[in-house]
Amino acid sequence: MKLAAARNWIGFGAAIAIAVTATSAGAKECFAPDARAQERAFSRAVITEGGKTLWLGGQTGTPTANFEGQTREIFSELDKNIKAVGGSGLKDMVTMTVFINDVRHGDRFTEIRKETFKDCFPASALITVSGFARPGILIEIHRGGGREVVKSILQRYQKITGRSFESSLP
């Protein structure tokens, strides 16, 4: 039974990651109950309701900057872009996909994300890649979506499994 619940949880997590969502106005709940999630500054799940859909392309920094400079520039630009379309900035982020080209940057990225998001971290994937489209790029962050996407996924999950989201958490 635990294996089936774990498979459902993994499938649900993959659906959330594919949806790549962000909130606009309103509350969000971050589910990061374990030491690993806290240590690596990500939420296992983020729940929101209502809102509007926002899609943004991948964001990179200045190729001549170091890793920390590029990361901080990306967060600054994402914050500006979200605010420019009526959002509240980075605090609206629900999930992100982060690409780095050197696994050794992972810990530093986690430290910067902790500093940036404080305690309600986005759900996240950190992926190491062999390179980017432009020389000098060390990191790219992609995010987008909206709360309707999360609500729709939760409703589909409940319909398929017959269980509420809360009863499926490990």
Image (spheres, grey):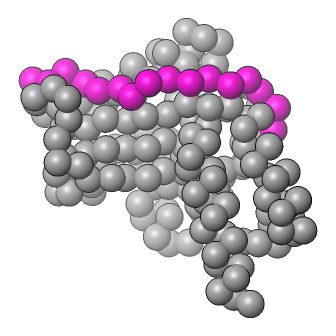
Q: Residue at x 60, y 68 (%)?
A: 10
Is residue 154 left or right of 22 when viewed as pictured? right
The residue sitting at 85% across, 51% down in the picture is 155
Is 65 on the left or on the right of 166, as rendered? left
Residue drawn at (55%, 30%), measured in percent from left and top?
A: 144
Magenta-drawn stretch, dominant element (helix, strand or loop):
loop
Res 50 quadrant in image = top right
Residue 28, relative to residue 64: is it above or below?
below
Q: Residue furthest top?
A: 84
Q: Nearer the viewer, residue 25 or 15?
A: 15
Q: Is residue 89 visible?
A: no
Residue 33 image offset from top left, x and y in percent = 62, 68
Q: Is residue 100 left or right of residue 121?
A: left
Residue 54: % across, % down: 62, 23
Is any atom of residue 87 visible in this view? yes
Picture residue at 69% right of the left edge, 88% below the top: 2
The residue nearer to you, when weighing 141 against 158, is 158
Magenta highlight on residue 152: no
The count of marks equals: 0
The quarter of the displayed image where residue 82 is located: top right
Can residue 60 be found in the magenta stretch?
A: yes
Quadrant location of the C terminus in the rendered image? bottom right
Residue 32, position as x, y percentages in the image = 60, 62
Residue 36 in the image: x percent, y percent? 46, 70
Per the rendered image, the range of residues in magenta is 49-64
Location of the N terminus by quadrant is bottom right
